[in-house]
Image: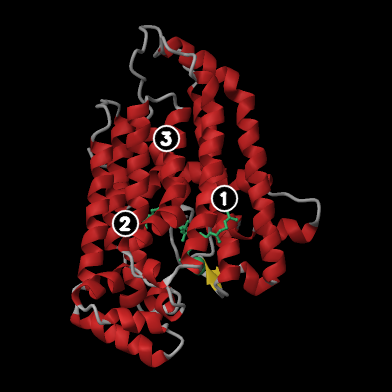
């Protein structure tokens, strides 16, 4: 039977584990220089008051970390015996070691994510982040950049130390699988997956910043950029969790597909909300993208209906009158609706990936999968 709490909030399943991860994250970013330490832990704070509230409340100055919650849910959703499982494979598995390696992936991913947000807020001159003052606003650009670099370096250290528990995993998989040779490549694969994510973040941000007129008006370019900027992190870390669990290539691919489509849906809705949201609902001013000259899906769809919008886009959006003109075309078009539909399609693909996972009669596995599917609905119905 469905738990009432679970129905209300898919994230509640991993809420307790999340607070353990938050404590560990704070410990992982301790630095020799006090200023660097306080900068680095700025977004990992979940103080006394934070712990009393549900950690998923966006309005609290608490650790949100929906990314880590998705990854923990994915870890639970894949927590079923791997095929080829020998009769003695199910018992005596060091599942706590496995879980702590999966938790490490969640922590590393969150550090990379926060590092990218620190740099992003410098590039965007942002004043708020996660409902509190952004770090660049509080401590300035220079310290924010260094804090981002520092987080990235600690993420690398944590990645490298995944090797320490490799032997344990190898022994576990040796019991479960005839083909255990690939075990010795697992850590290396996970390290290179996450290294690639960092490259993708930088690539996506640079693509957004340096596009030609042709590229700015191309849906293909927009989707590629969106994959790099938003979807790569979550898709590749979902895949890393699967690989680390010793799952097959097929299952790892489904985990990747879930993350990729969830990330794309999330960003498409983000781009819609930039037009439809209000400062009060978003916690940040609306129309920021277009005012910064960033052309997103709603405008691209509107351009298909009104090709003359292209010349408006080409003139740039330094002139507020040009912004108004673009908004006028957008209002007459189905741009917003079509962007929402595309987001829904990706959300459906994400849910379909979860539903294609090998069946399991484990309660916890089923509950986690339901939560992951529920999140795909929440991503497209959110309004902040
Ligand atoms: C969180 O960033 C968002 C992403 C990392 C993009 C991928 C999408 C998800 C993990 C799903 C989000 C789920 C819902 C229900 C919207 P952030 O730093 O802005 O948010 P955070 O503070 O919650 O981590
Ligand atoms: C948020 O986008 C920004 C990102 C998802 C990635 C930013 C990446 C970099 C700045 C490259 C540097 C990366 C590392 C790892 C140091 P947004 O500005 O559209 O959204 P927002 O509303 O959350 O600010
Ligand atoms: Mg930004
Ligand atoms: Mg940005």
Residue closer to the observer: 48 or 98: 98
Q: Is residue 384 in view?
A: no
Residue drawn 32% across the image and 49% down it: 261
Q: How far separated are the C-alphas under marks 2 and 1?
A: 21 Å
- Left or right: residue 44 versus residue 301 is right
Residue furthest bottom in the image: 321
163 to 306, vertically: above or below = above
Residue furthest top in the image: 87
- The quarter of the picture where residue 273 lies is bottom left
Query: x, y percentage for residue 184?
Result: 55, 20
For residue 112, which numbered disc appears in the image? Answer: 1
For disc 3, the marked residue is: 75
Residue drawn 56% across the image and 75% down it: 127
For disc 2, the marked residue is: 265
Residue closer to the observer: 114 or 38: 114
187 to 153, vertically: above or below = above
Disc 3 secondary structure class: helix
């Amino acid at each position: 039977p469905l738990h009432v709490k679970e129905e209300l909030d898919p994230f509640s399943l991993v809420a307790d584990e999340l607070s353990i991860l938050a404590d560990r994250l704070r410990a992982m970013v301790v630095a020799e220089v006090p200023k660097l330490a306080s900068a680095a832990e700025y977004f990992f704070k979940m103080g006394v008051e934070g712990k009393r509230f549900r950690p998923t409340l966006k309005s609290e100055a608490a650790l949100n970390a929906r990314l880590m919650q998705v990854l923990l849910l994915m870890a639970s959703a894949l927590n079923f015996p791997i095929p080829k499982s020998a009769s003695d494979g199910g018992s005596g598995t060091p599942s706590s070691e496995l879980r702590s390696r999966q938790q490490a992936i969640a922590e590393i991913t969150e550090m990379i994510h926060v590092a990218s947000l620190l740099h992003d807020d410098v590039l965007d001159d942002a004043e708020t982040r996660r409902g509190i003052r952004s770090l660049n606003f509080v401590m300035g650009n220079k310290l924010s950049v260094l804090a981002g670099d520092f987080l990235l370096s600690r993420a690398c250290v944590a990645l490298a130390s995944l090797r320490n528990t490799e032997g344990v995993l190898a022994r576990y998989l040796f019991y479960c699988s005839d083909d255990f040779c690939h075990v010795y490549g697992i850590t290396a694969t996970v390290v290179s997956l996450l290294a690639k994510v960092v490259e993708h973040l930088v690539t996506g941000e640079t693509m957004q910043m340096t596009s030609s007129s042709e590229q700015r008006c191309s849906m293909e370019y927009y989707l590629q950029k969106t994959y790099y900027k938003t979807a790569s992190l979550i898709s590749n870390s979902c895949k890393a969790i699967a690989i680390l669990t010793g799952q097959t290539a097929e299952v790892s691919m489904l985990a990747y597909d879930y993350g990729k489509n969830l990330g794309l849906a999330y960003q498409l809705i983000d781009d819609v909300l930039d037009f439809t949201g209000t400062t009060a609902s978003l916690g940040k001013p609306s129309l920021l993208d277009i005012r910064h000259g960033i052309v997103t899906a709603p405008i691209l769809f509107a351009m298909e209906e009104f090709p003359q919008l292209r010349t408006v886009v080409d003139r740039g959006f330094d002139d507020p009158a040009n912004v108004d003109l673009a908004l006028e075309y957008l209002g007459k078009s189905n741009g917003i609706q079509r962007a929402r539909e595309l987001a829904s399609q990706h959300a459906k693909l994400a849910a379909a990936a979860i539903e294609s996972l090998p069946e399991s009669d484990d309660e916890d596995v089923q509950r986690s999968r339901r939560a992951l599917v529920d999140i795909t609905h929440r991503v497209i119905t959110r309004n902040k």
